[in-house]
Image: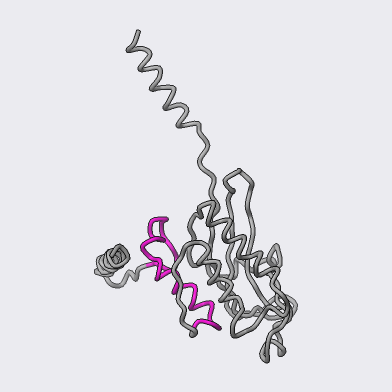
């Protein structure tokens, strides 16, 4: 009898484990967009932004885009602070498809809440809140990355270059990001057969340095 109960208990536990819902998580994906012509003879300027997709811990579906820009990014923005705003939701048709996806990973619930708090801080900042040299899409993405637990550069050379800044984030966090599968910004060159071994050694050195 005891043996049968043991077998039954094991089967019941296995069934519960199989049927238990997977823990909800929100995935954050970092994108940049190059200078490009937009529909209606307008222009898409270089830009950095993130997408959130998944479900929060309480099961609430999440699908959002977060980015920061000037309400009018023409001549006035070159001379000083201007009114800023969050990117429109949803983004224009085809905008994400025309952008470059750099990397993605699942957020903890605390990180997700920190990212939302960062976006709310920027959304409610006193106007004029956009300054091309200090509070632009690069600095917004930088604060979002920090809220998400990533290491970022403080180098001012990136302030006008989202297309360079976001790949730099990927490189700085390569060991962490690699555990979540292939990342576009961590693709190895196939022309060099030894590149994989070199990259593994580089990641191992980086991990040891952080541990020390």
Residue 101 vertical placement versus 15 (above, below)? below
Q: Position of residue 38 (x, y in %)?
A: 68, 77
Kindly identify the residue that appears in the image at 63 percent across and 63 percent down.
65
**Does the magenta run of residues contain 193?**
no
User: Residue 131: x, y in percent?
Assistant: 64, 83
**48 up-or-down from 59: above or below:** below
Quick one: quadrant of the N terminus? top left
| Count of picture labels | 0
Judge left or right: residue 24 versus residue 153.
right
Q: Quadrant of residue 176?
A: bottom left
Residue 29 versus residue 152 in the image, above or below = above
The segment highlighted magenta reads 158-187
Image point (64%, 46%), residue name: 60
Give 97 or 13, whichever is nearer the viewer: 13
Q: Residue at x 58, y 61 (%)?
A: 115
- Tell whether 109 sits left or right of 185: right
- Front residue of 72 and 82: 82
Horizontal and vertical percent position of residue 34: 57, 78
């Amino acid at each position: 009898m005891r043996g049968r109960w043991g077998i039954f208990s094991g089967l019941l536990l296995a069934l519960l484990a199989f049927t238990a819902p997977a823990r909800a998580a929100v995935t954050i994906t970092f994108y940049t967009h190059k200078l490009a012509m937009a529909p209606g003879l307008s222009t898409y300027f270089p830009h950095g932004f993130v997408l959130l997709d998944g479900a929060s811990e309480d099961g609430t579906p999440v699908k959002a885009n977060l980015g920061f820009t000037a309400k009018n990014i023409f001549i006035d923005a070159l001379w000083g602070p201007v009114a800023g705003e969050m990117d429109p939701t949803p983004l224009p048709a085809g905008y994400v498809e025309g952008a470059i996806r750099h990397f993605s990973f699942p957020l903890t619930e605390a990180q997700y809440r920190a990212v939302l708090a960062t976006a709310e801080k920027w959304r409610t900042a006193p106007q004029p809140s956009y300054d091309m040299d200090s509070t632009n899409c690069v600095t917004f993405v930088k604060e979002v990355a920090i809220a998400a637990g990533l290491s970022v550069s403080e180098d001012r050379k990136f302030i006008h270059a989202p297309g360079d800044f976001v790949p730099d984030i990927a490189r700085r966090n390569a060991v962490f990001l690699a555990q979540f599968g292939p990342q576009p910004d961590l693709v190895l060159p196939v022309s060099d057969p030894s590149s994989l071994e070199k990259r593994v050694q580089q990641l191992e050195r980086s991990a040891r340095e952080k541990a020390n």
